[in-house]
Each structure stands twice: as structure tokens, then as C-alpha cells.
Image (cartoon, rainbow, N blue to C red):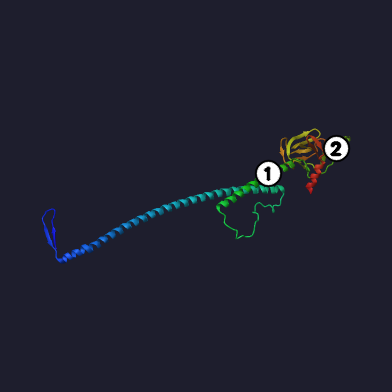
Amino acid sequence: MQIIFIPKKTGRVCRSCLSSRATWMLGFFLFMILPIATGGMTWYLLDHFSDSGNNQSAEEKIFVQKQRLAALEKNVVEIQRQSEASLDALSLQLGRMQAESMRSNALGQRLADMAGLDKNEFDYNEEPAVGGPHELASSKHQNLTDLQISIDMVSENISQERMELGLLENVMLDKDLKQSLDPKGWPVKRGYISSAYGYRSDPFTGKKVFHKGVDIPSAMGSPIHALAAGMVTYSGNRNGFGNMVEIDHGNGYSTRYAHISKLVVATGDRIDQDQVIAEIGSTGRSTGPHLHLEMFKDGRRFNPRKRLYSARKAKEN
């Protein structure tokens, strides 16, 4: 086989002769080896580009997963923030409920003391006993919404109960105040009525005169107690009465204490029921140490005997 080469640069004709063996090998290469090599190269290139495409898809998938993880982390942080805010709100509400409960317990304890209730029965320092069977079938955990609803209901009940206890306390205080302003009781520790309210013989002249109060003999210097709370309208000496104290108790009531040896209160003083206001004496027109007591309602005198003895009997019982 003869092969002719004509180089472009020189233009000279070159001839080369191949033997039949070389010609056969060249044909074998062109028709067998070259297609195989070309196919292998093509497969390699396709596989290479395919791997590149797969690698690119994996990177895209990793990027997408990272975005999803970031979104999940953001949701977790938001849920945690909301949970912490809910817990903070519940903590604040619990603190308010505890304060309300303490105020209600203190108020209830005052009412129990005012009413004279048995402290063993109404002990506000201990939790009330409760109980019941354990129901496994129906028992379940409360979610946050149910817990919030329960707390709101308890808080509302506590506020309502405290308001009702406050109203009850005002009623009881008003009742106690009215009772403390109502003159009754026994003004000295011991003694009796030696001269009643009404007509009697005057101890100095023997004439029939109207006695405007009651006389209660007692030891010199014995304390005299106010029959009711009020304000001292007069504390001093007055002709015939000697040293005297007058008290305005409100509601139209007033009392007068005369023949006192020592004045303990002054005009304008506010006094409580059963407070010591003076001491037994024999000043003024008197035959011996005793207390002359008068009672008034709307400026008019009335017989204090019934109030004195009924109150004294109740106190002794």
C-alpha cells in the first residue's frame, strides 16, 4: 500500500509504501480500536459530567436542608420565647393570687376574731383538708390553656371573696361602732345604786325633790370607766356637781359623771368605751364618795337603771 503526503509548506510529494501486514494493522486500528477508544472516551466524559451534575444536586439538597434547619431553629426559638413569656405571665398572676390570698386570710382572721369564732375551726394559717378517690381512667394532664383558665377562675373567686369579706368587715365594724357608742355597762368595779332616778328626799334638806340620775357608792379613788366611746364635751368643776365629766357619744346619746375626785380626761379628748376617765370622789354637794351618773337621749334625761343592770348582768354571765 502506497501513501502519498504533500506538505502544504513545501508542496513536495512524499510517498510511503506500507507492507500488507502494516496495512492490515492500520485497518484493524481504524475499524476496531478507534471506535472502541472513541466509545470509551465518550463514556468517560458522560460519566464525568454526570458525576458533576450529581454533585451539584447534592450541594443544592444540602443548601435546602440547611435552610430548613435554620427555619426550624427559628421556630424553636420563637416557641421557647412564647413559652417563657407565658411562664412569666403565669408567675406574675400567681404572685398576685398569693398576695390576694394573704390579704383574704388576714381579713378572714380578723373577722373570725371579731365574731369570736373557734380558732381551731377557722385556722387561716393552715390549708383546708381536701381529698377524694383516684380516678385513673379520667385523669389527664392539663395543657397550658386549661391551666390559664383555672388560674383565672381562682383569681376571680379570690377577688370576689375578698370584696365580700371587706363588706362583711365594714358591717361588723359599723355594728361594733354603734354598740360602742351606745352607753351601757357598769362604770365602776364594784358598787350598787344607793339612790335611784326619780323623786326622793333631799339628803341635806329632807324635802321631796326629783333626783335626775343615779348614785353609785364606791371606794375613794376607784377608777370610773366611760360607758361608751365618744368625745369629752366638758371636764371641770360645776356648782353642786363638784368635778364633772360630760361625754357626747353620738346618735343623740350623752352621759354625765359627777362628784369626781380626780379628772383623767380633758375637754375635747376622744375616748373609747370602758376607758378610765376619772376617779371616785366626794366633791360638790355630796355626803360621801360616790358617783352621780346621768344619761341623756337627744338632750332629754332618762332613767339609766335598766341599762346599767342589764349590761352588768350580761357581763357577769
How many labels were placed on the picture? 2
Q: What residue did someone put label 2 on?
A: 198
Please indicate, yes or no, whether residue 275 appears anywhere in the rendered image: no
Point out the tag, 1 or 2, that comes first from the N-terminus.
Answer: 1
State the SS at label 2.
strand
How busy is the neighbourhood of tag 1: few (under 14 within 10 Å), some, or many (20 plus)? few
Residue extending farthest bottom: 21
Instruction: Residue at 69% x, 47% y: name it.
Output: 111
On screen, residue 306 versus residue 136, left or right, reads right
State the SS at label 1.
helix
Residue 138: horizontal and vertical position, in percent?
60, 58
Q: Callout 2, which amino acid?
A: Gly
Residue extending farthest left: 12
Residue 53: horizontal and vertical position, in percent?
33, 56
Q: Callout 1, which amino acid?
A: Leu
Residue extending farthest top: 239
Decide which of 66, 54 is in the foreground and name it.
54
Q: What residue did someone put label 1 on?
A: 167
1 vs 2, front mark: 1
Instruction: Residue at 85% x, 35% y: name it.
Output: 210
On screen, residue 201 versus residue 228, left or right, reads right
